[in-house]
């Protein structure tokens, strides 16, 4: 298996520990040469090991805002356009030989799993205090669950590896059934929930907490309950998903979770690690900066499409097709405030400039979210600028949306569903959800709210897949701001699941290719 070539036993500890952590508050010494026999002797060395696991979160194919990270998956949908790596996902040619992202996600996830398993196999040797030992184990299990989630919900069943790297045996493992992998993820998270603290001291910001483990559990259960992964519509899965999201909501007063009052400013560096953030990838300048400012604003590698822009309601809570407030001559006026706080549209100001189709010539739109640029400010080092902006992976608004979705599937739109959705809308002063909706009608509103609230955050591709509507959302023409077709997209049913890259199969003959490829 190609991914496990990173973990040859002779060098595994060096690989894990010689990489400086990407966490701005997780600084540890850089080491030169270690083995299992001469390492793991102190608290500092164990912390170096777990920091090496966090470092993988910034690897290509996982969560980075680059041409291979999860944010790039916005371009696989009607939310955004991108060239290069995204094209096979949008033109019906997805296959095991033509997409770097497949191999990068597989390799990065198993790199992280290998590092975590190495920590779990060795961390007790340092003689840590019980509380410190619990925290290390909890963080490691949380990260292993996160890495496996990034595999199982794209590839289906994958090799389940729970021991430190051993290429000789692990490189010959077949796929484990998807259900077994999901069960292990949930088992890891249940232990992590018991061992992790609600919060850390200020110098440990960025580490996984009890709330992060609960949130990941809710997300895994929500995905697992959804139509793609639950074709029989087993209601017990929805019940568990609703309960898990509710656990986070119940923890919120103790953990300090709540919605940050300003939607746009939630995503700026000056406000990172705020009360809405449950878990994020930590960045800092100049050591480990975020490249989002360049990739999103300058290069426009992930450029919003007209379909996303048109999906934002008017301020009366109605669609542009139905609202009397909509004026085709002034299409961006009187819209849900999240439009202008997420996307620079033609005629608006961003980075101190008036946005137009010459400045943003890919689609006429550009994402503000996940950049540290502000509307009215100009920057002395523009256009080449990197920031220390963290990448948010889990936030409280998503927890509320997860609860609303699962609870609606369990009992329909009860008061608790309206309450959490209206809380999200209150932040941006949008009208409350219409009362008296049926379960189906509420499902539509929840899906719309997820698309708008979480636009540009790399979740919509998973959403349209798990809802089993990708064949509608990913198929057909997409448009720029001038309503011109810029791509005619094609989606093939087999693409609900990703193929295993040929290079991985060549290294492990026990693996079977995904059906249809």
Image (cartoon, grey):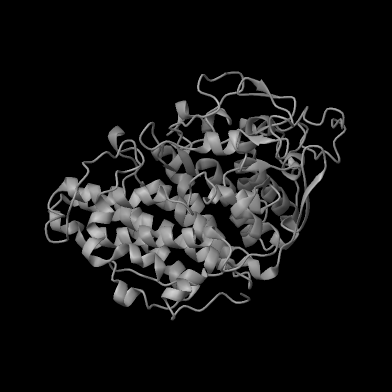
Left or right: 465 in relation to 141:
right
In the displayed orientation, state which residue is furthest to the bottom.
Answer: 510
- Residue 131 can be seen in this image: no
x, y percentage for residue 162? 32, 68
329 or 245, nearer to the observer: 329
Up the image or down, 414 lies above or below 391; here it is below
Quadrant of the drawing holding the N terminus: bottom left
Residue under the point 50% across and 50% down = 246
Q: Which residue is depicted at the point 63% across and 65% down?
A: 94
Observer-nearest of 164 and 181: 164
Q: Nearer the viewer, residue 237 or 142?
A: 142
Instruction: Name the residue at 17% across, 58% down.
Output: 124
Q: Is residue 115 left or right of residue 59?
A: left
Q: Quadrant of residue 164?
A: bottom left
The C terminus lies in quadrant: bottom right
Q: Is residue 118 visible?
A: yes
Q: Quadrant of residue 119?
A: bottom left
Residue 432's spot in the image, x, y percent?
70, 37
Q: Residue at x 28, y 66 (%)?
A: 8
**Residue 290 position within the rendered picture, expressed as x and y whole percent measured from the top left:** 46, 37
Q: Is residue 287 left or right of residue 90?
A: left
330 or 362, which lies in front? 362
């Amino acid at each position: 298996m190609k991914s496990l070539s990173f973990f040859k036993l002779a060098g595994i500890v060096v690989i894990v520990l010689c990489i400086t952590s990407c966490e701005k508050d997780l600084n540890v010494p850089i080491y030169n040469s270690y083995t299992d026999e001469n390492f793991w002797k102190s608290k500092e060395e164990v912390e170096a090991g777990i920091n090496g696991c966090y470092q993988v979160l910034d690897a290509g194919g996982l969560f980075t805002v680059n041409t291979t990270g999860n944010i790039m998956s916005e371009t696989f949908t009607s939310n955004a356009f991108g060239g290069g790596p995204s094209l096979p996902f949008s033109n019906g040619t997805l296959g095991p030989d033509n997409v770097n992202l497949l191999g990068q996600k597989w390799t990065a996830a198993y790199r992280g799993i290998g590092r975590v398993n190495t920590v779990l196999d060795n961390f007790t040797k340092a003689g840590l205090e019980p509380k410190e030992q619990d925290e290390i184990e909890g963080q490691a299990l949380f990260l292993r669950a996160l890495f496996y989630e990034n595999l199982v919900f794209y590839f289906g069943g994958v090799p389940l590896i729970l021991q430190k790297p051993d290429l000789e045996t692990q490189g010959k493992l077949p796929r484990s059934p998807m259900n077994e992998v999901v069960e292990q993820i949930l088992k890891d998270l249940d232990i992590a929930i018991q061992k992790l603290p609600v919060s850390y001291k200020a110098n440990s910001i960025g580490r996984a907490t009890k709330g992060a483990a609960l949130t990941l559990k809710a997300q895994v259960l929500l995905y697992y309950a959804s139509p793609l992964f639950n074709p029989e519509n087993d209601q017990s899965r929805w019940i568990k998903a609703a309960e898990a999201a509710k656990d986070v909501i119940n923890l919120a007063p103790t953990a300090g979770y709540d919605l940050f009052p300003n939607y746009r400013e939630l995503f700026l560096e000056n406000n990172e690690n705020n009360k809405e953030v449950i878990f994020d990838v930590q960045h800092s300048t100049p050591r480990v900066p975020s490249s989002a400012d360049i990739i999103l604003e300058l290069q426009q590698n992930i450029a919003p499409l007209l379909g996303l822009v048109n999906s934002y309601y008017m301020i009366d809570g109605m669609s542009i097709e139905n609202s009397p407030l909509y004026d085709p001559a002034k299409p961006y006026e009187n819209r849900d405030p999240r439009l202008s706080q997420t996307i620079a549209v033609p005629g608006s100001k961003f980075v101190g400039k008036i946005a137009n189709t010459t400045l943003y010539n890919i689609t006429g739109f550009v994402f503000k979210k996940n950049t540290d640029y502000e509307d009215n400010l100009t920057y002395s080092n523009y256009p080449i600028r990197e920031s220390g902006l963290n990448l948010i992976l889990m936030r409280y608004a998503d927890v509320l949306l997860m609860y609303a979705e699962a609870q609606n599937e369990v009992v329909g739109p009860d008061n608790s569903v309206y309450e959490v959705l209206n809380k999200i809308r209150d932040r941006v002063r949008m009208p409350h959800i219409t009362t008296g909706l049926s379960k189906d009608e509420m499902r539509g509103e929840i899906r719309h709210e997820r698309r708008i609230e979480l636009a540009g955050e790399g979740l919509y591709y998973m959403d349209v897949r798990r809802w089993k509507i990708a064949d509608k959302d990913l198929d057909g023409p997409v448009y720029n701001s001038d309503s011109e077709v810029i791509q005619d997209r094609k989606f093939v049913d087999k693409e609900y699941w990703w193929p295993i890259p040929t290079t991985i199969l060549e290294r492990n003959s026990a693996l079977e290719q995904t059906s249809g490829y």
